[in-house]
Amino acid sequence: MNICRTKAELKQQLSDLRKDGKQIGFVPTMGYLHEGHASLLRKSKADNDVTVLSIFVNPLQFGPHEDLDRYPRDEKRDVAIAEECGTDLVFIPSVQEMYPEKPLTSVIVNQLTDRLCGASRPGHFDGVGTVVSKLFHLIQPNRAYFGMKDAQQVAVIQQMVNDLNMPVEIVPCPIVREPDGLALSSRNVYLSAEHRLQAVVLSKTLQQAMKWANEPEMTVERLLAKVKVNIDKASEAVIDYAELLYYPSLQAPEPVALLQNLKQPLILALAVKFGATRLIDNRLLDAMEVSEHVQNDDEVQASPGNRYGSEPELCR
Ligand SMILES: Nc1ncnc2c1ncn2[C@@H]1O[C@H](COP(=O)(O)OP(=O)(O)OP(=O)(O)O)[C@@H](O)[C@H]1O
Ligand SMILES: CC(C)(CO)[C@@H](O)C(=O)[O-]
Ligand code: BAL
């Protein structure tokens, strides 16, 4: 596996790897890899001849009071995980390498960024769109792999690629979870033991919501009220948002609409703070799931076979 830190090295390495029309899969990350990232790398490896991983904590997508300075990093461990997943090339640029000057150009996706994390984190998706677009130009992948934990990000990137005719296929990948249901996230490492126990309320509430969605006469506003009451039961949880929207348009249905009458799929998306740690999670409600009351088999659980958990004891 090759590691490169500059655009020039990347260009050189890619020109060798790309020979003979080889297909390139790309997994962009901010590092501190866990099983969620590993699942994207393995999927890319299965679909393509060459897999490229980027590790870059992108300052453009952090707000002034967010966790840029304390974002977890462990390059040595990331490189070991990347290698085990069969990655061919890791791009680990410095901030200076990516942004030698403050960029005067931004990639802004409108409308899809008005709600959820776009509303809670102003400017976040401008930073994501800009860096992903730069990475796509540098790497020119055939396919790029994104996790559905960041479902709004998937919708935004797909829109950007469509609108700007970027020649890359976006591949959304299922959410990988801890055995108790918590979605893996690099930020889980911030949680105290107490908050870690409470954080399971996100996935449990999403699961419970699938059952409520099947109740006759269930409306959007009633479902959201039940979701919020359930999350509030975790004593230190502070809800940032709990929204039910059409996916991927991220438009809101009428609050009084009956769920059974709504065109599917819908997404139930949550952002909840435990102390200073803000976690997100979501679940897609599709017509079949609502009417048949089935579990979402797309969701992958981190198990002993899925080795890289996001909690400190699982990471080491
Ligand atoms: N649990 C997960 N399952 C599947 N994909 C995931 C999971 N967590 C993150 N990803 C995906 O990995 C890619 C890189 O994400 P990132 O490096 O920000 O990790 P993260 O764990 O989401 O970090 P953060 O805690 O900052 O949200 C994104 O496409 C993201 O959706
Ligand atoms: C896509 C991404 C790597 C861009 O910095 C980031 O938003 C992430 O890790 O999801
Ligand atoms: N996975 C999203 C990156 C961020 O929270 O900035």
Image (cartoon, grey):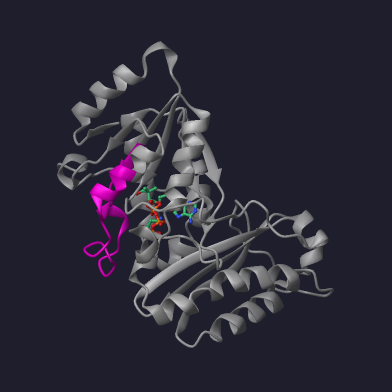
Looking at the image, how many numbered discs can be counted on the residues? 0
Q: Is residue 55 visible?
A: no
Check the image and report above or below for 32 versus 160. Answer: below
Q: Is residue 61 magenta?
A: yes
User: 152 or 9, which lies in front?
Assistant: 9
Q: Is residue 300 magenta?
A: no
Stretch of the chain drawn in magenta:
53-80
Left or right: 127 as drawn, with respect to 308? left
Point 46% across, 81% down: residue: 238
User: 257 or 240, which lies in front?
Assistant: 240
Check the image and report above or below for 141 versus 160. Answer: above
Whereabouts is ligand 3, in terms of quadrant? bottom left
User: 310 or 252, which lies in front?
Assistant: 310
Q: Is residue 25 visible?
A: yes
Residue 90 quadrant = top left
Point 32% across, 41% down: residue: 54
Point 45% across, 63% down: residue: 117
Q: Residue furthest top?
A: 20
Q: Position of residue 8 (x, y in %)?
A: 19, 27
Q: Quadrant of the C terminus?
A: bottom left
Q: Position of residue 249 (x, y in %)?
A: 60, 52
Q: Position of residue 220 (x, y in %)?
A: 70, 72
